[in-house]
């Protein structure tokens, strides 16, 4: 079986090492721009993060695309044939890591730690005791990651709830009823740009946003305006529309916006390799591919 690795911008070598240790019979091919048509025509499976447009047409045998991440949107290019199964990594350790990151950012905001960081710069020993933080937090996304985030937030005292496609409340109703909003949604046609000026205006004045999903969920110019005007007190953005975020991007210098470089939580190479090989064995036994997405929904 021939497997194409599409891990760019991550190097393929660690994935090749981890997969071949578990399944030495596989022929693992690292993608590079000059790959010839005959090699691509023989590929059965692709494992990776993003699919270069035009590539699926050169892989007529391709039957399965396995994402090395929780998200799959960069693999779902328009020319990927509808019969191709797409699966993703579902990793409890990644979900817990995401939850840790969110709890850190939410506590940092709710316990006013930014104020004390600023005060330290001025050597100002000024006390503003904060009450127990019990803010209302809406977590957009009720999948494996969103649900874990809700559990962790509840454990540290927040009034957290999830919101998703099947919720009875509208997005804007939930936003209006939240002090803090956490975005943990998959990126699909339906969720792109969901957090725009209207959505941000629906949030209570002074509320806060944490995004650990994808930069494209947020209309960044609208967010900058909302933070500058005080409609939002700030935001923690682990993801941005343009990654790496260019040095001249206005997001870097908005007081109240914290930028981190897409580091909330990743699965280890070993976990990704183990899940891929377990799914491959299931397929070889004639079972369905675990953690396959619904192609129509895009997640
Ligand atoms: C993911 C990510 O989707 O790390 O897993 O962004």
Image (cartoon, rainbow, N blue to C red):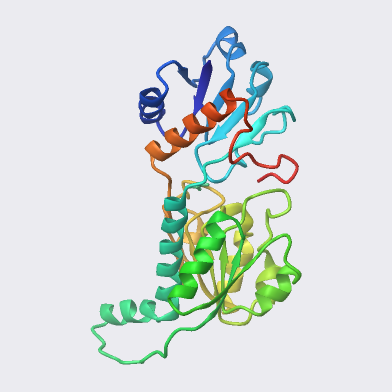
User: In this view, which residue lies farthest toward the front?
Assistant: 285
Compare residues 275 and 52 and report the one nearer the observer. 275
Compare residues 33 and 252 and report the one nearer the observer. 33
Residue 169 percent location from the top left of the image: 74, 72
Q: How many marks?
A: 0
Residue 178 percent location from the top left of the image: 61, 78
Residue 221 percent location from the top left of the image: 61, 62
User: In this view, which residue lies farthest toward the left?
Assistant: 123
Question: Residue 253 lies in what quarter of the image?
Answer: bottom left
Give the left or right position of residue 248, taking residue 294 as reference.
left
Q: Residue at x 46, y 72 (%)?
A: 106
* 17 versus 59 height, above or below: below
Q: Residue at x 46, y 46 (%)?
A: 244
Question: Residue 167 lies in what quarter of the image?
Answer: bottom right
* 228 versus 133 height, above or below: above
Task: Look at the image and tell me whether residue 51 can be seen.
Answer: no
Give the left or right position of residue 11, taking residue 172 as reference.
left
Residue 83 percent location from the top left of the image: 73, 28
Q: Residue at x 72, y 72 (%)?
A: 172
Compare residues 191 and 98 and report the one nearer the observer. 98
Q: Residue at x 63, y 39 (%)?
A: 292
Give the left or right position of residue 201, taking residue 159 as reference.
right
* 89 versus 221 height, above or below: above
Task: Look at the image and tell me whether residue 119 can be seen.
Answer: yes
């Amino acid at each position: 079986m021939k497997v194409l690795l599409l891990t760019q911008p991550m190097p393929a070598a660690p994935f090749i090492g981890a997969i071949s240790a578990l399944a030495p019979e596989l022929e693992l091919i690292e993608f590079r721009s000059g790959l010839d048509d005959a090699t691509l025509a023989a590929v059965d499976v692709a494992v990776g993060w993003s699919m270069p447009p035009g590539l699926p047409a050169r892989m007529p045998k391709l039957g399965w695309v396995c994402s090395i991440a929780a998200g799959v949107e960069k693999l779902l290019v328009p020319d990927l044939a509808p019969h191709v199964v797409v699966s993703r990594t579902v990793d409890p350790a990644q979900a817990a890591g995401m939850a840790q990151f969110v709890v850190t950012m939410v506590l940092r905001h709710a316990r006013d730690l930014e104020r004390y960081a600023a005060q330290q710069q001025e050597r100002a020993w000024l006390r503003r005791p904060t009450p127990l933080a019990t803010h209302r937090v809406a977590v957009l996304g009720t999948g494996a990651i969103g649900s874990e985030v809700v559990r962790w937030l509840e454990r540290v005292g927040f009034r957290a709830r999830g919101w998703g496609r099947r919720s009875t409340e509208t997005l804007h109703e939930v936003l209006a009823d939240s002090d803090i909003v956490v975005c943990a949604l998959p990126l699909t046609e339906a969720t792109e740009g969901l957090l725009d000026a209207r959505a941000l205006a629906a949030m209570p004045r002074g509320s806060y946003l944490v995004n650990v999903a994808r930069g494209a969920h947020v209309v960044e110019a609208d967010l900058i305006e909302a933070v500058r005007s005080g409609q939002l007190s700030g935001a923690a953005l682990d993801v941005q529309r343009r990654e790496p975020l260019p040095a001249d991007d206005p997001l870097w210098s908005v007081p109240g916006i914290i930028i981190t470089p897409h580091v909330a939580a990743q699965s280890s190479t070993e976990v990704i390799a183990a899940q891929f090989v377990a799914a491959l064995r299931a397929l070889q036994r004639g079972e369905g591919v675990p953690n396959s997405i619904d192609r129509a929904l895009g997640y």
